[in-house]
Every structure is written in structure tokens, then in C-alpha cells.
């Protein structure tokens, strides 16, 4: 699993350590113990036009959406799997 940290928060923590002249080992240990940010990978997809004009489906999970919703940009994300919709 990928772990991410909030860069600004970590840099602020290092800045607070400067007066104490911490060495690289202390900073490495601090990095190991720094809390992970609450993130998840971005899944990108696109709407695929269904046969016989029956709307569109998500390229990842195949969930269907109406023609009007996709045409008017009402679904920037798949309502079922959460994939971020990109232009075709």
C-alpha cells in the first residue's frame, strides 16, 4: 500500500526542530513516525456509448448512466465506482 504524507505539515515539523540541531537520523525517524495523509489512488475512466442509444456506461465498472446526464456533464465521477471521468 502506498503511504502519503502532507508535505507542508512535515516541513513545518522539521522547521520546528531546527533550533535543537537534530541530525539526519532524527529526521528519518520522525519521517517514519509521521502520520499518513488520508488519500486514495485516483481511478480515471470515461463514458462509453452503449449500443442502440441506451445511454453510456463507465469504462471501469460498466455502470450505466443516461444520455442526458453524460451529455450535460452531470456525472464528473462514476456514481458506482467513483472513477473520475475524463473526456473521450
Image (cartoon, rainbow, N blue to C red):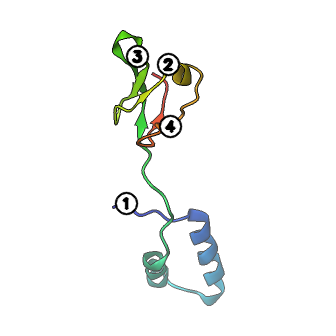
Question: In the rendered image, which residue does mark 3 sit on?
Answer: 54
Task: Assign a secondary structure to mark 3.
Answer: loop
Task: Identify the image quadrant of the N terminus.
Answer: bottom left
Marker count (numbered): 4
The residue furthest top is: 52
Q: CA distance from mark 2 to mark 4?
A: 15 Å
Task: Assign a secondary structure to mark 1.
Answer: loop
Q: CA distance from mark 4 to mark 3?
A: 19 Å
Instruction: In this rendered view, identify the residue nearer to me: 59 or 21.
Output: 59
Residue at image location 49% in from the left, 19% down from the top: 67
Q: Residue 51's spot in the image, x, y percent?
A: 34, 13
Question: In the rendered image, which residue does mark 1 sit on?
Answer: 2
**Label disc, if present, on residue 86 of the rendered structure:** none
Q: Is residue 80 above or below residue 35?
A: above
- Dot 4 or dot 3: first in sequence order is 3
Q: Residue 33's spot in the image, x, y percent?
A: 45, 79
The mark closer to the camera, 1 or 3, is 3
Q: Is residue 43 above or below residue 87?
A: below
Task: Assign a secondary structure to mark 4.
Answer: loop
Q: Is residue 47 above or below residue 38?
A: above
The mark closer to the camera, 2 or 4, is 2
**Label disc, if present, on residue 67 of the rendered structure:** 2
Amino acid at each position: 500500500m502506498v503511504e502519503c504524507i502532507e508535505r507542508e505539515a512535515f516541513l513545518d515539523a522539521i522547521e520546528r526542530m531546527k533550533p535543537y540541531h537534530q541530525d539526519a537520523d532524527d529526521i528519518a525517524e520522525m519521517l517514519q513516525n509521521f502520520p499518513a495523509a488520508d488519500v486514495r489512488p485516483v481511478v480515471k475512466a470515461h463514458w462509453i456509448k452503449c449500443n442502440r442509444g441506451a445511454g453510456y456506461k463507465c469504462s471501469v465498472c460498466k455502470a450505466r448512466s443516461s444520455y442526458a446526464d453524460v451529455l450535460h456533464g452531470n456525472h464528473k465521477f462514476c456514481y458506482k465506482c467513483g472513477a473520475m471521468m475524463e473526456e473521450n
